[in-house]
Image (cartoon, rainbow, N blue to C red):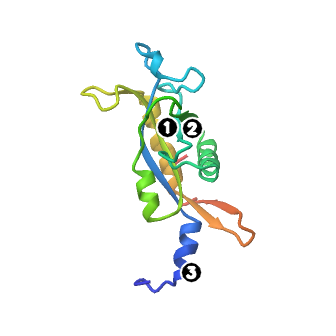
Amino acid sequence: MALGKTKEDYHRALASGMMLSVDNAHALHPNHPEYADATNSVYMNEGIVIKTHAGQKYTSDAHAIALFKDICDYAHVPYQFYANRSDMVGGSTLGNLVQRLVSLSTIDIGLAQLAMHSAYETAGIKDMDDMIHAVQVFYHTHFQLESDHTISIIRSETNKLF
């Protein structure tokens, strides 16, 4: 409101906004496959990881996932999905804490890596390049809330990144 906007303008901005919560994700470790879910593993250099958790330790929801998948498809960036094992305590990100303060569409994404929080973490360089490209496309994309409650995706043509 200090910028001359109304409370309605604020809520419209939130409704048409999106937040990326970017961290890393546990890749299948070849020396410790017992810590991974055999049907739900992610791998280094096979794309950005979209993280979900039924208890909302990761904030990704169907709406945000659909928008981010569209960005990745447009940018020709591969992606994969990760969910914590249901029988083991897993990590979380700061996205769920931030979302409690400002409720807007949020997606938790990351890079598959080995040895998270250790002295030597290992991640794939291809994933890093893909992440940079996808985030650039994200920041050149505008989400517009339409009167029928759909979201229009408008991409900036002023900066040819892709």
Return the residue at label 2.
77
Return the residue at label 1.
130
Q: Nearer the viewer, residue 89 or 53?
A: 89
**Which label number is shown at residue 109?**
none
Give the quarter of the image for residue 8.
Answer: bottom right
On screen, residue 80 versus residue 109, left or right, reads right
Residue in the image at 48% along x and 48% along y: 135
* Disc 2 residue crowd, few under 14, some 14–19, many 20+, Cα 10 Å: some
User: Of helix, strand and loop, which one carries label 3?
Assistant: helix
Name the N-terminal-most of marks 2 and 3: 3
* Disc 3 residue crowd, few under 14, some 14–19, many 20+, Cα 10 Å: few
Q: Amino acid at mark 3?
A: Glu
Residue in the image at 46% along x and 86% along y: 4
Give the quarter of the image for residue 69.
Answer: top right
**Which label number is shown at residue 8?**
3
Q: Residue furthest front?
A: 87
Q: Amino acid at mark 2?
A: Val
Q: Could you give the CA–CA distance between mark 3 and mark 1, rounded to whole angstroms?
A: 36 Å
Q: Nearer the viewer, residue 17 or 32?
A: 32
* Disc 1 residue crowd, few under 14, some 14–19, many 20+, Cα 10 Å: many
Please determine whether, in this image, residue 74 is positioned above or below residue 44.
below
Residue in the image at 44% along x and 52% along y: 95
Please determine whether, in this image, residue 138 is positioned above or below residue 13.
above
Name the N-terminal-most of marks 1 and 2: 2
On screen, residue 18 versus residue 89, left or right, reads right
- Do residues under tags 1 and 2 come within 8 Å of each other at their CB atoms? yes
